[in-house]
Amino acid sequence: SAVISQKPSRDICQRGTSLTIQCQVDSQVTMMFWYRQQPGQSLTLIATANQGSEATYESGFVIDKFPISRPNLTFSTLTVSNMSPEDSSIYLCSVPHPLAKNIQYFGAGTRLSVL
Amino acid sequence: GENVEQHPSTLSVQEGDSAVIKCTYSDSASNYFPWYKQELGKRPQLIIDIRSNVGEKKDQRIAVTLNKTAKHFSLHITETQPEDSAVYFCAASIWFGNEKLTFGTGTRLTIIP
């Protein structure tokens, strides 16, 4: 499986500010996925990040609130903009297996608390 | 789009007993069904998966069964141990489709020593 490094592991932020979360993979991958896991809830896909093109957002998530960068095949960032307490969640990136893209491996997550 | 329902939301079993978690899906095009285990404060980890060309798959104490006609699949854990305590998520996707996973709502499994 891929080695995925996600930073920061946790942060406490003030409302109205923004936080950028980084996801680094030890191998080149075509797609990277960003999920949100609200407290005690399931994983909800925010967007799919493709290298060289704009991210594809799921219903209910917009680029202005969750801008994503994908500068190369091993790195992506997710920014949570203009945060409110409702954005308090765990944010996780995932990458697919190189030969079986439905199999996904997750980063350790970023636990975000917004005051 | 796909919708995955998962039951029960919480499950407590005595150590050594079996645990069963059930999921149903809505999109008949879905043909890949993984199960993830998430221990407290840890990342979700794939523990077993099944594709729709088989009805059952086993890996030591865990097994997954699939009923394509009824559109449901289940996770079976036998001889449960304390380290099985975690939240389990089922998911569905289309193999060689768009690779997106739709997750169930999760089951918090507690093994009682």
Image: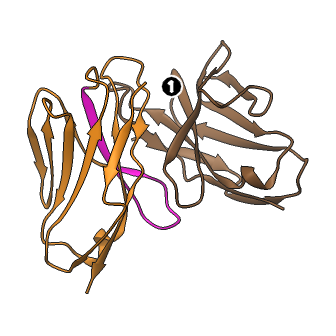
Report the span colored magenta. Answer: B31-46
The chain to which mark 1 is attached is A
- Horizontal side of A95 relative to B52 (left or right) equals right
Residue shown at 55%/53% (left/top)? A108
Question: Among all residues in the image, which is located at the extreme bottom?
Answer: B113
- Quarter of the image for residue A63 reads top right
Residue shown at 51%/20% (left/top)? A30
Neighbour class for label 1 at 10 Å: few (<14), some, many (≥20)?
some
Question: Among all residues in the image, which is located at the extreme top?
Answer: A53
Please state, as top left, top right, bottom left or bottom right, where the N terminus of chain A lies in the image. Answer: top left
**Where is residue A6 shown, x and y percent of the image?**
63, 47
Q: Is B33 colored magenta in this rendering?
A: yes
Q: Amino acid at mark 1?
A: Val
- Chain B display color: orange
Q: Which chain is brown?
A: A
Secondary structure of the residue carrying numbered label 1: loop
- Horizontal side of B59 relative to B105 (left or right) equals left
**Where is residue B86 shown, x and y percent of the image?**
37, 66
